Image (spheres, rainbow, N blue to C red):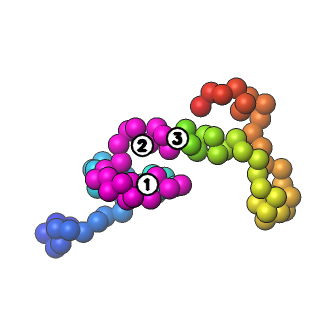
Amino acid sequence: MKAVRDDAIIATGRSDFPNQVNNVLGFPYIFRGALDVRASKINDEMKIAAAYALAMLAREDVPDAVADAYGGQVMAYGKDISSGAI
């Protein structure tokens, strides 16, 4: 690819190189945060902070609008989710 265009971005889903971004890194808002602080890469500390934030978000009650969109389906973790382990 570099022979044709050296500034091309190849979106393979892999993250072997610092300039590759897997879609999981962009959800939710870690990519926005990186852009806001003009970070040149997403480091391990940012990934860990995002993992903790997602873990806390997953423990929140499902909003009624979301449950309604899924036909009133009950969406909750099992009894062990409240243990605090991530």
Residue situated furthest right in the rendering: 72
Start-end of magenta stretch: 28-50
Callouts 2 and 1 close, C-beta under 8 Å: yes
Q: Amino acid at mark 2?
A: Met
Residue at (77% x, 44% y) in the render: 76
Callouts 3 and 2 close, C-beta under 8 Å: no
Q: CA distance from mark 3 to mark 2?
A: 9 Å
Q: Secondary structure at mark 2?
A: helix
Q: CA distance from mark 2 to mark 1?
A: 9 Å
Residue occupied by mark 3: 51
Magenta-colored segment: predominant secondary structure: helix
Residue 13 visible in the displayed image: no
Residue 45: image x %, image y %?
Answer: 40, 38
Estimate how packed mark 1 is, as few (under 14), some (14 to 19) or many (20 or more) residues with alpha carbons within 10 Å.
Answer: some
Q: Secondary structure at mark 1?
A: helix
Residue occupied by mark 2: 46
Picture quarter with the N terminus: bottom left
Residue 4: image x %, image y %?
Answer: 16, 73
Q: CA distance from mark 1 to mark 3?
A: 14 Å
Relative horizontal placement of residue 2, taking residue 35 as reference (left or right): left
Estimate how packed mark 3 is, as few (under 14), some (14 to 19) or many (20 or more) residues with alpha carbons within 10 Å.
Answer: some
Q: Secondary structure at mark 3?
A: helix
Q: Earlier in the sequence, mark 3 or mark 2?
A: 2
Estimate how packed mark 2 is, as few (under 14), some (14 to 19) or many (20 or more) residues with alpha carbons within 10 Å.
Answer: some
Residue occupied by mark 1: 33
Q: Amino acid at mark 3?
A: Ala
Name the residue nearer the viewer: 83 or 78. 83
